[in-house]
Amino acid sequence: MRDVIKEKKKRQKQSPSKVQDQPAPQQRGSSSLEDRSPYNDNSASSPLSPSPTDISEFLTKHSITIHTLQGVESHTPIISFSQLDIPDQLRTAFIGFKEPTPIQACTWPPALKGRDVIGIAETGSGKTLAFGIPALSNLARSPSQEKKSKSTVSVLVVAPTRELAIQTHETLSALGKPFGIASAAVFGGVPKEPQVKMLQNASKAKDGLTTRIIVGTPGRILDLMADGACDLGNVNYLVLDEADRMLDKGFENDIRKIIESTKQGTKRQTMMFSATWPEAVRRLASTFLREPVRVTVGSDDLTANSRVEQVVQVFDDSRQKDSRLLDTLRTLALKKKPNGLSDSRVLVFALYKKEASRVEQMLKRQGYTVCALHGDMSQKARIEMLEKFKTGQANLMVATDVAARGLDIPNVAAVINYTFPLTIEDYIHRIGRTGRGGKSGRSITFFTGDNHERSLAGEFARVLREGGFDYSELQKFPMSIKKKEHSVYGAFYRDDIALPAGPRRIVF
């Protein structure tokens, strides 16, 4: 025991600066890939490494499960920002945060070593920085920063929606600016020509920045590839964000085509993030990821954010919704700072575009500073409204489910479901807009039992029961749970059928 204590004191006396003096990791696919192999991981001997007890307590506290293949060395979670061996400029991303989120703590170590990673976690868990920090760290230290390679894009992030693509693009742009690295966002709903021109002039970006990152939606990425404007041949860092959502929307074939256009095998590092771990996502992962480390925070199934208080209010007459909404907003008492900006925000979800517009106008007549976000708006108007809400110029937003997933809007104090969504999954993603970044939040749901709502009462009650919230008002409706249906194939879809085995090579 004395020898252990002496050795521990000896390590503590070593200068922490030695961590920064270690050789920078080579880019994946380089001739010295072995130097950054996970099998050569010496992080366990780092003076900044937490004790096994600290790690065990951390994993238990956050219900984290880490899966690695047998025979593959595991990685020690990073539970303090001081443990990260990254360029100092990237540390500005942590300002205001006490410690890494669970998904960041467990995915950073293998990702920074070049390993393929799968992250399963609830919305609002910090997944953008989970893949963004390793991406920028590799780019900042990569030899391909040399002039001869500045025209190549080596990082690709694929996202299911325009809003999420824009948000991710903004985050990565801010991280990359100190290194002269720019990000390009490509998505549908706007003309292609400006995006084509932007990609063609990637190496001539303004302000001395070079476009090394593309963030986009599957459809527009494929369109630009077909036009010859988007060359993914040099992509060696691929991110599939919200993979389950993309597969639900029928993008599987598009995703496969995109992946096949990037570097293959050991020359590409792949990061896949998802809120759930269904069979369809597992098949995609088994096809394109190599010996991945899979980190699950909580459950493999979609679960509501435990930091969000869930309240349901049942109505006999849907015409009572407007007056109840106004009463609820008065109770929430939205406050503004002296500069006129809102300190907290409330997000009201409507089911249809016309309903969102009507509720928006009703609230404006009541004197609220309100903005809207729905599919009838142009992309430019949607971006403007989103920015207005993010910055606090408007403290109230009425939106359809276009804003329900992936968007990271700070200080959303509460979510109000004016009309219940079409699926329980959409409900969980809606309320995930509050309670983000470790903060607590509140969701208030108006429920009438009309139309589609009656058949979802059982599932809704289950979610409330699992969270420990009152669901007694819902018991007047049938408590049966409807069988899940695929968005494309309906009730006939099965996700438990294994893919046929590939052709075997016969040696004579």
Image (spheres, rainbow, N blue to C red):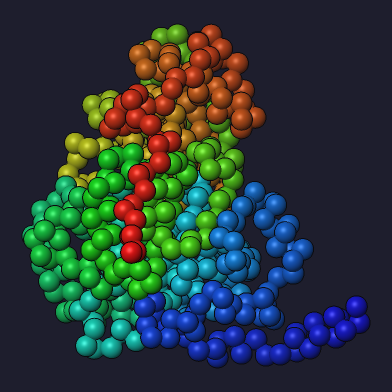
Q: How many marks?
A: 0
Q: Is residue 8 visible in this depiction of the protein?
A: yes
Residue 292 vs 312, above or below: the answer is below
Is 381 or 306 nearer to us in this picture?
A: 306
Q: Is residue 463 above or below residue 73?
A: above
Residue 286, located in which quarter of the rendered image? Answer: bottom left
Q: Is residue 27 left or right of residue 17?
A: left
- x then y, percent, for residue 122: 50, 46
Between residues 192 and 288, which one lies in front from this camera angle?
Answer: 288
Image quadrant holding the C terminus, namely: bottom left
**Residue at position x 14%, y 59% from top?**
224
Left or right side of 446 for 399: left
Q: Is residue 157 visible?
A: no
Position above or below: 461 against 377: above
- The quarter in which the N terminus is drawn is bottom right
Question: Residue 273 in the image: x percent, y percent?
Answer: 43, 53
- Position of 293 with respect to 362 (left or right) is right
Residue at 23 percent across and 55 percent down: it is 257
- The residue located at (70%, 52%) in the rendering is 60
Side (left or right) of 266 relative to 307: left
The image shows residue 322 at horizontal and vertical percentages of 38, 20
Place of residue 267 in the rendered image (x, y in percent of width and height, measured from the top left): 35, 73
Q: Nearer the viewer, residue 95 or 70?
A: 70
Residue drawn at the location 43% of the way across and 41% of the way down: 279
Q: Residue furthest right?
A: 2
Q: Is residue 88 above or below residue 492?
A: below
